[in-house]
Image: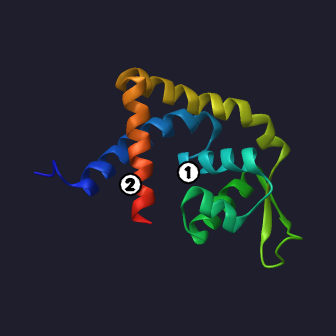
Amino acid sequence: MFEQCLYFNTTSLARQLEREWTIAFKPFGLTPSQAFMLRVVLDKAPLLQSELAKEMSISRPTATRTLDGLERLDLIKRIASERDGREQEIHPSKTALELKDALNAASGAVTKRLKKILGGNHFETVVEQLRGISSALK
């Protein structure tokens, strides 16, 4: 019935992938959204919240809610920005820095498993096509 429906098929895939990464990040007490955001912070800090939201293709209010959770877990720190007085810079905490390699390894293990299931070339082609579709719809 929905063989040609982009919405149905991408949301179905998103739910399946959400389950995969939920399992991967559960040992850290993080949701996939929190873990991916933390990985961006760990890789690109310091970031303004607006920069982080743009990097993750999410709204600023969504970023705020996820950052609030990461702050409660003592994984990020918000520091007044000298670049833009209206925003705060996002920095990883010492605890987060200690998790960096393990978080990347957990995510990498899921990616490796999916590449094995789908075939490496197919996996990379699909990701590239999805990124292209996303960019075209912006």
Relative height, residue 136 to residue 112 (above, below): below
Give residue 72's position: percent from left, percent from top: 72, 56
Question: Which quadrant holds residue 13?
Answer: top left
Residue plotted at (50% across, 24% down): 112
Residue at the extreme top of the image, as rendered: 116
Q: Nearer the viewer, residue 62 or 81?
A: 81
* Location of residue 94 (image quadrant): top right
> Disc 1 vs disc 2: which is toward the camera?
2
Q: Residues within 10 Å of mark 2 (few under 14, many from 20)?
A: few
50 with respect to 75 (left or right): left
Can you give x and y, in whole percent of width and height, for residue 126 in the image?
38, 39
User: Residue at 44% across / 33% down in the picture?
Assistant: 124
* Image quadrant where one finds the C terminus: bottom left
User: Which residue was labeled with disc 1?
Assistant: 33
Asked whether, in this view, residue 6 is left or right of residue 124, the answer is left
Under mark 2, the amino acid is: Ile
* Residue positioned 36% across, 30% down in the render: 122
Query: Closer to the N terminus: mark 1 or mark 2?
Result: 1
Residue lying farthest to the left in this orientation: 1
- Between the C-alphas of marks 1 and 2, the distance is 21 Å
Disc 1 on helix, strand or loop?
helix
* Residue wearing tag 2: 133
| 32 relative to 89 in the view: left or right | left
**Percent x, y for residue 3?**
15, 47
Q: Nearer the viewer, residue 100 or 112?
A: 112
